[in-house]
Image (cartoon, coloured by chain):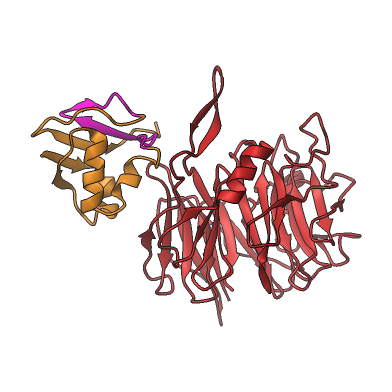
């Protein structure tokens, strides 16, 4: 089980949830589990091909994920995962 | 009279009351709204959103603009691929919806069509709850080699014939116009006579850059298109097209709106390269004789120090009401077919779409 922390800018689309818990061996699995809890949230984070959206960042235990195309980075048990809005506007 | 205005920073509704036009508070403040429409069948309002961070989204209001809720966004199924430009050439990548450009009612209650970048057309038959890629057109997209202009491969116009909705004309940049007479089972290109002067073959079967497509309200065979390379009218359902502004001065713009079969409005801009208002002034062009002659409509529009242009979905007309919004966030309305204009919302964010509620 991982702790998931959402950027405040996603609050409007998570039903007000800023933190939750979800299970998944990899970030892509975690997103599927999150989508069960918070309908449609995965599509905010990744596109339908499973790639991280260009202006979104995901951190696992403080480290930015490396595989942004398929989100296969592992999520260790007890990890904290931050889903953040990337700095895209200068 | 009400008008939905999609802007770079939210959705607004303009309403004509006894004392004039009023602007609503925005919905989706801060979120780009590419297009919006009212479904005349049940009064629902639909908005095509293009979040800068979170991707394209679709939202609906079933309480007349008070609240909007997210619904499932069209998505490409596994196995759909497109050519993507890379520094080392084109590569096949999985297709994903980049933008939602238009949503229109289809031929049954609760059915809709949506047009997207990269050229996918999607259909819903359950009131917009779920969406499926329209496979026949996707197959044609790949066979005919549709390509992307600066804005992508934009399927931006879907025009079901009102009294015969299985007959559909669509506009794609860059592919041109297509027609289906059987609800989308088969499609034929309709680009004869339309130049593509950015290609070696100036009159290809497909590849034209139609900027917007409109159908006459009283004759389904009369169509107009504002093209990257001219301003064209068809009187035979798109089989052949004639350039109605051959002198070139007013021939480029994005939007086009039609009234009856003799009447159309456009808002020209200064050249492909510059893309600003003509001579520092806004002008609306109107024809009432099928494009034989044009009137320059300027009353009430800024005539100096003006650099606004009007995007493809930001010009609309219905029953004498004509409205448009500009890249500088100004919405102008005419209640006399364009003879005079009022800036009813002069300080909005950049306008993507203007849709008169029907």
Quadrant holding the C terminus of chain B: bottom right
Q: Mostly what secondary structure, the magenta segment?
A: loop
Relative side of B77 to B166, left or right: left
Q: Is residue B6 visible?
A: yes
Colour chain A appears in? orange
- Can you tell which quarter of the image residue B222 is in? bottom right
Q: What residue is shown at x 60% (from left), y 50% (from top)?
A: B136
In depth, the one of A53 and B110 nearer the eye is B110
Q: Residue B66 in the image: state x and y as whole percent.
A: 38, 71
In depth, the one of A87 and B343 nearer the eye is A87
Q: What residue is shown at x 43% (from left), y 56% (from top)?
A: B58
Q: Residue B188 in the image: state x and y as whole percent.
A: 73, 51
Q: Is B121 one of the magenta-colored residues? A: no
Q: Residue B9 in the image: state x and y as whole percent.
A: 45, 52
Colour chain B appears in? red
Considering every residue shown, the one lying at the far bottom of the view is B18
In the displayed structure, B167 sits above or below A86; it is: below
In the displayed structure, A76 sits above or below B229; it is: above
């Amino acid at each position: 089980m991982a702790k998931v922390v959402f950027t405040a800018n996603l609050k409007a689309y998570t039903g007000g949830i800023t933190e939750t818990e979800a299970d998944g061996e990899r970030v892509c699995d975690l997103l599927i589990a999150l989508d069960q809890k918070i309908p449609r949230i995965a599509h905010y984070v990744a596109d339908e091909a499973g790639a991280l959206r260009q202006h979104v960042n995901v951190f696992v235990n403080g480290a930015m994920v490396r595989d942004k195309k398929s989100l296969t980075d592992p999520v260790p048990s007890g990890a904290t995962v931050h889903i953040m809005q990337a700095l895209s506007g200068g | 009279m009400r008008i939905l205005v999609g802007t770079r920073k939210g959705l607004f509704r303009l309403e004509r009351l006894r004392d004039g036009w009023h602007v609503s508070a925005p919905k989706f403040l801060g979120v780009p709204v590419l297009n919006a429409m009212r479904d005349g069948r049940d009064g629902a309002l639909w908005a095509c959103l293009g979040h800068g961070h979170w991707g394209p989204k679709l939202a609906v209001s079933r309480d007349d603009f008070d609240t909007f809720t997210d619904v499932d966004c069209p998505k490409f199924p596994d196995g759909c691929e497109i050519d993507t430009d890379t520094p080392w050439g084109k590569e096949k990548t999985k297709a994903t919806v980049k933008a939602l450009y238009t949503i229109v009612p289809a031929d049954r209650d609760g059915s809709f069509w949506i047009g997207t970048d990269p050229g996918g057309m999607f259909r819903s038959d359950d009131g917009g709850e779920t969406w499926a890629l329209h496979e026949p057109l996707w197959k044609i997209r790949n066979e005919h080699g549709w390509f992307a202009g600066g804005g992508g491969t934009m399927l931006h116009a879907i025009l079901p014939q009102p009294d015969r909705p299985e007959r559909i004309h669509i506009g794609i940049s860059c592919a041109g116009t297509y027609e289906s007479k059987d609800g989308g089972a088969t499609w034929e290109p309709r680009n004869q006579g339309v130049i593509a002067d950015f290609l070696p073959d100036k009159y290809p079967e497909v590849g034209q850059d139609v900027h917007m497509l409109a159908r006459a309200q009283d004759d389904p065979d009369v169509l107009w298109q504002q093209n990257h390379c001219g301003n064209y009218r068809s009187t035979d359902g798109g089989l052949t097209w004639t350039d109605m502004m051959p002198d070139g001065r007013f021939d480029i713009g994005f939007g086009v709106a039609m009234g009856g079969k003799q009447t159309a409005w456009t808002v020209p801009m200064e050249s492909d390269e510059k893309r600003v208002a003509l001579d520092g002034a806004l002008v609306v062009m109107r024809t009432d004789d099928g494009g034989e002659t044009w009137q320059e409509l300027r009353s009430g529009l800024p005539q100096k120090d003006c650099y606004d242009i009007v995007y493809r979905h930001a010009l609309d007309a219905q029953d004498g009401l004509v409205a448009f919004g500009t890249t500088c966030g100004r919405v102008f309305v005419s209640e006399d077919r364009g003879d005079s204009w009022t800036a009813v919302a002069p300080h909005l964010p950049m306008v993507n779409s203007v849709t008169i509620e029907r």
